[in-house]
Amino acid sequence: MMNKERLKRVITEMKKLGLKQILVSDDPSIFWLTGRIVNPMERCGAILIKDDGDVHAFMNNLFCFAPLDGVTMHYYADGENPYKLIADELVPGPVGFDKNWASKHTISILKERNDIIPEFGSEPIDICKSHKDEYEREALRHAAKINDMAVEFGINHISPELDELTLSNMIEEFFEKHGAVQDIQLQYVCYGKNAAEPHHGAVAGEMLHEGDAVLFDLWAPINNYWCDMTRTVFYKSVSEEHRKVYEIVKQAQQAAIDFVKPGVKMSDIDAVARKVISDAGYGEYFLTRTGHGVGMTVHEPPEASPSCDLVAEVGMCFSIEPGIYLKDNVGVRIEDLVIVTEDGCEVLTKYPKDLQVVE
């Protein structure tokens, strides 16, 4: 059934933003509202929400999307035009379209009506989804526990006999055995200089050598909520330079975590981590934002970046993951998920962060 409390919150945000009608097509957002997975693939599937509480759902009948209480259902078959069904229910003026909807759907609706104005319409849902209720917080805590176990599994299986891709696949299988759903993106396992690429994909034949950093960036959806965590360890030995870099990143991450509380700007959280790294002389090697929101998707608002002026509020969940990336040398990133609390934040991922040399 439609979650009436969440719907009410979305409509409140619509009114604040002056949006009279929005089309929700993002699968996780529809699940958040209805508790149902849709995944219409290339077909059209959407929920129309109006600021007066009138709600319509448009679904292909192949997907057996059962009626929802308080929602006017519109079904269509392959070969029929779903866009006219949607267009007929729109009122003239601005329409908020989902930011992730394929342009073929948006354009097809616009062709049906010349009296509507397309606008970005995801913000009301995004704002509401960024404030996790207690059910969602517990789901994120559970996912984080699995993430801790996966990181420990990966570190315990570091071996010069395993290339990056083999170890990545082993970790993916571990996740799936513990309730995760396979994602198209493999787990990041990065040896040596490959760790200096912030989004290095595991490579077959890439082997481990003494003194290498080993960076694990591991994430997966578990019961529809994501975990995301990074740890960097060293194999057999660590140079003084690499030790120095590690300790700077660790200090930056802890400073940012300590700064998190309701009312602070997300950009200021980023600035705290960035200042530690810049003051140590490595500012130009901090190549990424400090963090991103996590929930029913692994990247969602809010983000801890220089350009984000959103304010941290109770219930928001996001990563804190500063890093230093020295090309052709070493990369170090440490990442935890936090949930904003009344007086600070709760750190969800618990695997130790003291520098670790694996024998």
Image (cartoon, rainbow, N blue to C red):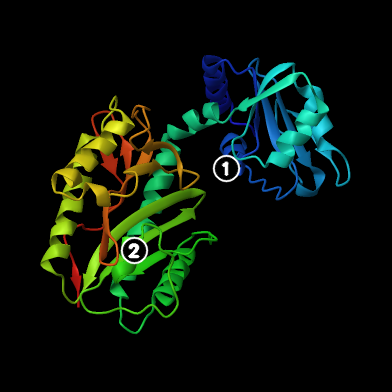
Assign the C terminus to one quadrant of the image: bottom left
Distance of label 1 from label 2 (alpha carbons): 26 Å
Q: Does residue 217 sit above or below 86 in this rendering?
A: below
Residue lying at 80% horizontally and 49% vertically, measured from the top left: 62
Q: Compare residues 47 and 145 and report the one nearer the observer.
A: 47
Q: Does residue 256 sit above or below 91 in this rendering?
A: below
Disc 2 marks a residue whose amino acid type is Phe
- Which of the labelled discs sits on residue 216, or is there none? 2
For label 2, the SS is strand
For label 1, the SS is helix
Check disc 1 and report the residue beneath it.
28
Residue 239 position in % (x across, y down)? 14, 69
Residue lying at 73% horizontally and 21% vertically, measured from the top left: 116
Q: Compare residues 100 and 180 and report the one nearer the observer.
A: 100
Q: Is residue 153 visible?
A: no
Disc 1 marks a residue whose amino acid type is Pro
Residue 145 position in % (x across, y down)? 35, 55
